[in-house]
Image (spheres, rainbow, N blue to C red):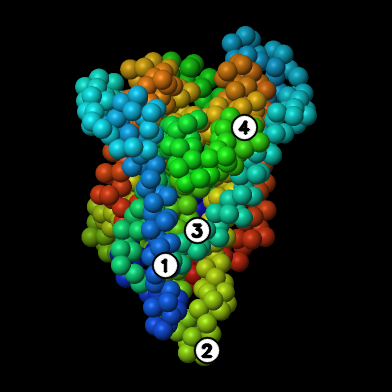
Amino acid sequence: MTAPVTLELPPDAAPVTPVGPPRRRLSLGTPVTYVLAVVVSLFALAPLVYVLIGGFRTTGQLADRPLALPGPWEWSNYTDVLASGSFWRQAANSLLIAAVVTGLVVFTGALAAFALSRYDFRGRETIYNFFTIGLLFPAGVAILPLYLLLRNMNMLDTPWAVALPEAAFGLPVTIVILRPFMRNIPGELEDAAVIDGCSRFGFFWRILLPLSGPALITVGILAFVGSWNAYLLPFLLLSEPTQYTLPLGTAVFSSSYSSDTAKILAFTAVSMVPALVFFMLAQRRIIGGLTGAVKG
Amino acid sequence: MTSPSTTSTASRPVSGRRGRPRSSVRKRVEIGLFLAPAILLYLGFVVVPMLMAVFYSGFKWNGLEPLNNFVGLDNYQRALSDPVFRGAIWHNLVFILLSLVIQLPIGLGLALLVNRKMRGRSALRMILFAPYVLSEVVTAVAWLLILQPDGPVDVLMQKVGLGHYVQLWLADGNLVLYTLFVVITWKYIGFAIILFLAGLQGVPRELSEAASIDGAGPWQVTRHITLPLLGPTIRIWVFLSIIGSLQLFDLIWIMTLGGPANASNTMVTYIVQRGFQRSQFGYGSAVAVILFVISFAFALVYQRFVLRRDTEGATTRMVG
């Protein structure tokens, strides 16, 4: 779903020029605007706040008065989750898989995008289109054969079982973002490098990659977030609880403790935190990456 | 179609085409080395499994026994005549239509709103975008608890006097799709807003200023200047939204497992039910192939008839 678009969003697009009404309308429009903004924000935030605060209540309190504040504040849900070990193990699994996926996607994607952007050869567009078709593949389409393939390779219940397919499915968007970026790096740089005795790979490694930094970070973040949040592949390929990723663990936790609402809320809240923190840190990159991407 | 084109250039004599003197053998090796890792990964875990799905779809097979019960197109016939699968396709279609009719106007409206000069605009943007960053799993688990009978939504409705409108949000087969759609909208509207905001950056301020100097009201400026210039962005959002709706799985699986009584099945939940839960690997593969054909056909048609203008613009710009 994060696929083909080409809109150049300046990453530092903070000051936005208002398209709308000239000044005389502002006084009239503003109160309505603010009310609307508050209503919409409440709708966006209320579920998150409910989960975070609900984790501080007991299931009894939640059942009696679903909307009340905690009284008294109950810390045991959160401390239980954080002390259980399964949360940390799942987070570590997710981190490992996401890191492998990100590394694989960025490395192989950058190499391929280099060949597809700075060499001239027959069949280049065919190969490029061949990759872009992958933007349309939901992993669901290939999931049955993937499962059989990984079972035959004895890789089920290993991090690789999830990481390799996720990386493969992440390649299309990576190449589609990187290629135009690399293509726009001036040819004079390449000529100069060659004259100075740089090999093609040397040019790629020492000049092109560093210059592609922003685009590499963008595709890296997309790959990382995609993997961190993924559910379908871990759900079908990992059955051993010690291998669970965080989303899979969250889903399993919620169905196996279904009577203990407060615990589920605490677990869900804790598993929201990494994504939200990551988002705060990398907000501009994520937004820039999602919007300033590609075109099929 | 899949083999790296190094082989196709190999048959040609060394043509000293433009460029600096570099032996063509060496160039081919270089291209091959640069492309090989990505192509191997992509072939091995995307293309080959896809082709295997096409192959398996001709068999009645549980994934374990020898693959010898060839049934031709039988699986496709069965799938297309199964009311449950037809229902699943219909549900995907409902999600597509609801997204276009409801999310598009809301997303546009909110983007225009956030695009104005106002205090707390960047905070508002961040708030609207936060749900998008969460996984569908977290979203689903949270909403499952929020929507449970006598849960916060029900109690809130009773408090404000809407008590007799309370429903079994997820257990009522006639309602479940719409409930799920609200949750999907909650999660994905931020993406639409951010995308449209990016598009609005490209609308030159001078145009709307000139129009309002000429006496156009805010509505006219929006209608005749902003929206048309936002056209390419909207068309791309529509494309992404439709592809996304066709692929829905995580959220629905966790909230309803496609139920009650298949009322919220999508094509992918149906694949998982048949393929994995009932070990119908041949049949599930046929369904997967149908899903791919639908996505691919849609994408081709959309590219050809809707996105073409935008793409042409992009390529000429890239060349020029």
- In the rendered image, residue A123, in percent from the top left (x then y), is placed at 55, 50
- State the SS at label 3: helix
Q: Which residue is mark 1?
A: A33
Q: Which residue is mark 2?
A: B215
- State the SS at label 2: loop
Which image quadrant for residue A71? top left
Look at label 3 and name its amino acid: Gly
| Residue nearest the viewer, comparing A146 with A33 | A33
Q: CA distance from mark 2 to mark 1?
A: 23 Å
| Res. A118 visible in picture | no
Q: Is residue A267 left or right of residue B53?
A: left
| Residue nearest the viewer, comparing A294 with B86 | B86
Q: CA distance from mark 1 to mark 3?
A: 15 Å
Which of the numbered marks, if any, corresponds to residue B107?
3
Residues indicated by labels 3 and 2 sit on the same polypeptide chain: yes
Residue that extends furthest to the top in the rendered view of this protein: B65
Dot 1: chain letter = A
Whether residues under marks 4 and 1 lie with C-beta atoms below 8 angstroms apart, the answer is no
Q: Earlier in the sequence, mark 4 or mark 2?
A: 4
Relative vertical location of residue A135 with respect to residue B215 in this rendering, above or below: above
Q: CA distance from mark 4 to mark 1?
A: 36 Å
Q: Which residue is mark 4?
A: B172
Q: Earlier in the sequence, mark 3 or mark 2?
A: 3
Residues indicated by labels 4 and 1 sit on the same polypeptide chain: no
Packing grade of label 2 (10 A; few <14, some 14-19, many >=20) is few
Whether residues under marks 2 and 1 lie with C-beta atoms below 8 angstroms apart, the answer is no
Residue located at (66% from left, 21% from top): B282
